[in-house]
Image: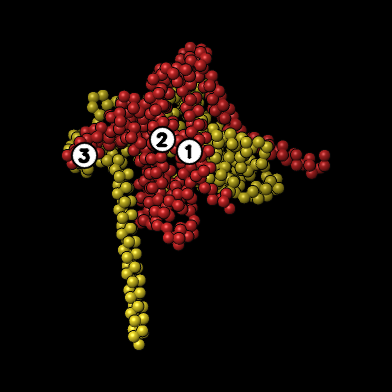
Chain colours: A yellow, B red
Amino acid sequence: MDQVAVEKRLVEARRKAETLEQWQQAVTYCLGRVVLHAVVILLSLVFALPLLWMISTSLKTDPQVYHVPPIWIPNPVRFRNYVEVLVERPFGRYFLNTMQYAMPTVVGVLLSSALVAYSFSRIRWWGRDALFFICISTMMVPFQVVMIPLYITFKNFGWLNSYKPLVIPAFFGNTYFIFLLRQFFLTIPQELSDAARVDGCSEIGIFYRIITPLSKPALAVVALFQFMWAWNDYLGPLIYLNREELFPLALGLQQLRASFQEKLVWPYMMAASASVIFPVILIFFLTQRTFVEGITVTGIKG
Amino acid sequence: MSLSLKRLKRQEVRNFVNGIFFASPWLIGFLLWTIYPILASFYYSFTRYDVVRAPQLIGLTNYADMLLRDATFRIVLGNTVYFVLLGVPAGLVVAFLLATLLNSEIKFRPVFRTIFFLPSIVPAVASAEVWRWVYNPRYGLINSTLKQMGMAVIPWLSSPVLAKPSLIIIQCWAQGTAMVIFLAALQDVPRSLYDAARVDGASALQRFWHVTIPMCTPAILFVMLTGLIGTFQYFTLGWLLTQGGPKQATEFYSIYLYRNAFRFFKMGYASALAWLLFLLIVTFTIIIFRSSARWVYYAAQAE
């Protein structure tokens, strides 16, 4: 009987130990989760701070900017800064200019890169893979190597101070997007193309009627990325554009800073910067999934 | 020739014609905007050319000047290599850590992902203005807070020692694209591997080091290579925030090149600089690629 009692005690003790261990595991898990969330929240605050600081400054009056300790939420909130700065310098013009060359580049890049990617993925022809390899390796060539001859060429063409140097090359394919679209086109079953060929469809017909409709997500990614890239481009416009009427937002923002003769008015500067950033963020929110998909497709297949 | 062989040959020719036709935008563009400029800049690098007058061949003078007589070049090269050796790994680590955090079970993941990703799509010009203000020695975000706490201010962009690290910080802030790539790679790691490791008694840290990182090495290689190629060409923020100062601490290769080409109008010299940059990039790329065989694990190959 003693043995039974001892055994019972043993079983109870084991059960208690298990529960205790479970408790410990639960507590560790909870603590871990709390720490994790704390770290993430802290980090995201750190990452968001510069932009929040920008917005906060953009809504202050000039003297408030120099207040110590720093004010985070100004009272009153001066939305008028945005109106004033966007009127003081021709930001409307800058915006239109940016659209004026960004949109054509999107069209050009979409059209040309899709066609070329089609060739590299949907047609089997002699020399295709070697040429594709050459295409990819041009990604290693720094822009600086081609920058000077291109500038001189465009100068000789008389294309300086116009959007031609920025727009026309876009119609000749973009290596990055050719690569992206090629990878995507490769995932479309060959049988679709073969069946269409058997039915007598021309290659161009297959491209237009079969591949393009199936590739809408990838094409959307290309359009989005190219637009963002054109919106953010600084070096290109810097080299080719000299007249202020042609300046896109990137150069216009810099002009604003140069135009402050005596003292830099930070609230205006921040309001202008925020205005340049805001459309980009808006587009991102509207197209979030497309964006993330696009980066992962190139990153992983690369 | 038999009939079917003839048909095959005709099909091949047709495919070739079609292939070339579809690829023609790139082919023509390649000749116009890539091959021609590459050859032209190679030629220019052996000339003295100020755009106004015709280029004059001067042999290897540009290269000799660059490597032997130009003191600024050495500073520029040092700055750029410093920036690459410090900035690329730093950005990589930050991106990977952020991706790891996002990959764990946290609530509101899309919100955090957005916050971490946003800086990378901010236009460089706007980013420059924002950080110029953040780094302001007296009233900027960081220094005004430090002053408030009674501590000494930090001369971020005005100190020759701190200028490059300050730029690297901005670089790490904008690692959103790399982070997203790593996030996708992390999500591709088979759960079974983690389970097996757990069964073997591996701690969380051990699982991270022995399972997570090795399985992500292809993505790490990709980010490293693209980061390297991009960082060697670093221009916009260095130009806008510090113009190469203070005391040439942030005079990077690309900025020095731009100056020589469009301020001093020494197109020949700038072309020589460009070619050396090309050489540098190719060399580093080959080194990393060669070494990659030793540390990159391609899951597909193993099967």
Can residue A95 be seen? no
Report the residue that reaches farthest toward the front: A2
- Vertical order, B67 against A118 (above or below): above
- Picture disc at residue B225: 1
Q: Residue B299 at x, y = what percent?
A: 54, 50
Residue, disc 2: B85
**Residue B214 versus residue A116 in the image, above or below:** below
Mark found first going from the N terminus, 3 or 2: 2
**Chain designation of label 1:** B
C-alpha span from label 1 to label 3: 38 Å
Question: Label 3 crowding class (10 Å Cα cut-off): few <14, some 14-19, many 20+?
Answer: some
Nearest to the observer: residue A258 or residue B45: B45
Between disc 3 and disc 2, the foreground one is 2
Give me the chain letter of mark 2: B
**Do circles 1 and 3 both sit on a common chain?**
yes
> Mark 3 falls on what kind of element?
helix
From this viewpoint, is residue B3 visible?
yes
Given the image, what chain letter belongs to the residue carrying mark 3? B
- Residue found 50% across the figure and 44% down from its top: B295
Q: Amino acid at mark 1?
A: Leu
Instruction: Judge from the rendering whether residue B93 lies leftward or rightward of residue A119; answer left or right.
Output: left
Quadrant the N terminus of chain B occupies: top right
Q: Are marks 3 and 2 on the same chain?
A: yes
Which residue lies under the disc numbered 3? B146
